[in-house]
Image: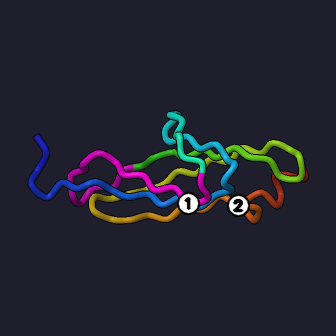
């Protein structure tokens, strides 16, 4: 049973609208440039990690980026995947 102060965490992701996005390996269905996700209720005072992976194309080349995001109950965390993240990756 969760404590009374348990609450979901919110993750706001900004990425290219055409990108596919997975959260801990599970594909999401949204197709917009800003996507909002809520975790299940989490006990307060602890940090939890989610791995987000975005896949999209830059200059015709496929790019896959992953970020581990730390969240806490009742808080909002912003994450961004964009062209500045792939400056060195697209050249590989």
| Chain part drawn in magenta | 32-48
Q: Nearer the viewer, residue 13 or 31?
A: 31
* Residue at x-position 64% and y-position 46%: 54
The correct choice, above or below, for 23 with respect to 89 in the image is above
Q: Residue furthest top?
A: 26
Q: Earlier in the sequence, mark 1 or mark 2?
A: 1
Scheme of image coloration: rainbow
Quarter of the image where one finds residue 34: bottom right
- Label 2: state its secondary structure: loop
* Residue at x-position 11% and y-position 50%: 3
Counting from the top left corner in percent of width and height, residue 56 is at 74, 46
* Residue at x-position 82% and y-position 61%: 87
- Which residue carries the number 2 mark? 82
Image position of 24 (left or right of 83): left
* Residue at x-position 29% and y-position 45%: 40
* Image quarter hosting the N terminus: top left
- Which residue carries the number 1 mark? 34
Counting from the top left corner in percent of width and height, residue 76 is at 38, 65
Classed neighbour count for the residue bearing mark 2: other residues with Cα under 10 Å, few (<14), some (14–19), many (≥20): some
Question: Of tags 1 and 2, which is closer to the observer?
Answer: 1
Counting from the top left corner in percent of width and height, residue 6 is at 18, 54
Quarter of the image where one finds residue 22: top right
Q: Which mark is residue 21?
A: none
- Report how far apart the C-alphas of labels 1 and 2 lie in the structure: 12 Å
Counting from the top left corner in percent of width and height, residue 31 is at 60, 48
- Label 1: state its secondary structure: strand
Classed neighbour count for the residue bearing mark 1: other residues with Cα under 10 Å, few (<14), some (14–19), many (≥20): some
Image position of 41 (left or right of 2): right
Residue 83 is covered by the magenta coloring: no
């Amino acid at each position: 049973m969760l404590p009374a102060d348990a609450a979901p965490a919110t993750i706001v992701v900004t990425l290219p609208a055409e990108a596919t996005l997975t959260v801990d390996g599970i594909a999401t269905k949204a197709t917009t440039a800003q996507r909002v996700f809520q975790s299940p209720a989490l006990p307060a005072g602890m940090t939890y990690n989610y791995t987000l992976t975005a896949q999209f194309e830059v200059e015709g080349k496929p790019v896959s980026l992953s970020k581990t995001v730390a969240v806490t109950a009742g808080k909002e965390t912003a994450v961004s995947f964009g062209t500045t993240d792939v400056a060195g990756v697209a050249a590989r």
